[in-house]
Amino acid sequence: QVQLVESGGGSVQSGGSLRLSCEALRYTRRDYCMVWFRQAPGKKREAVAAMDTDADKSIADSVKGRFTISLDKTKNTLYLQMNNLKAEDTAMYYCAVRYGWLLVDWRNPSEYDHWGQGIQVSVSS
């Protein structure tokens, strides 16, 4: 079955950078959209950025200018380059995938069919 495997998380100081990766194993759809969500303790899951195989992308205002999303279709792998990290970026980061294009409602978790286990990002001030 489909499996999403995240990597690249860890602990950094404020102002540092990390690059998250998410590989969608055994995902055979040609047209799809992948997304990054994050959830901090005691807070709701928040959509961070999404991108589809047609290269359409969306990114949350809270990370715009600091985070960049990219997708390697040949590897079914989604990336999130996170620069100038802040303490408020500390959270568990999850990737997810859905069949089809990027939706207007891309921030809705229920739109996605498969989820990764999550990976921790911790930023110390």
Image: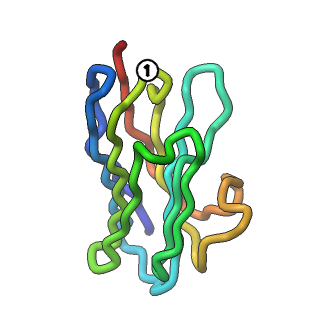
Label 1 Cα crowd, 10 Å radius (few <14 / some 14-19 / many 20+)? some
Residue 90 image offset from top left, x and y in percent: 44, 26
For numbered disc 1, what is the local secondary structure? helix
Residue 103 image offset from top left, x and y in percent: 68, 70
In depth, the one of 47 and 114 nearer the eye is 47
Q: Amino acid at mark 1?
A: Ala
| Residue at position x 57%, y 69% in the image | 98
- Coloring applied to the structure: rainbow
Q: Which residue is mark 1?
A: 87
| Residue at position x 50%, y 42% in the image | 63
Left-right relation of 62 to 73: right
- For the C terminus, give its image quadrant: top left
| Residue at position x 48%, y 45% in the image | 94
In depth, the one of 96 and 50 nearer the eye is 50
**Quarter where residue 114 is shown:** bottom right
> Image height check: is 112 above or below 5?
below
Residue 6 image offset from top left, x and y in percent: 34, 49
- For the N terminus, give its image quadrant: bottom left
Q: Residue furthest bottom?
A: 30
Left-right relation of 101 to 94: right
> Image height check: is 18 above or below 74?
above
**Quarter where residue 68 is shown:** bottom left
Residue 9 image offset from top left, x and y in percent: 30, 37
Left-right relation of 94 to 110: left
> Image height check: is 74 above or below 37?
below
The number of numbered badges drawn on the structure is 1
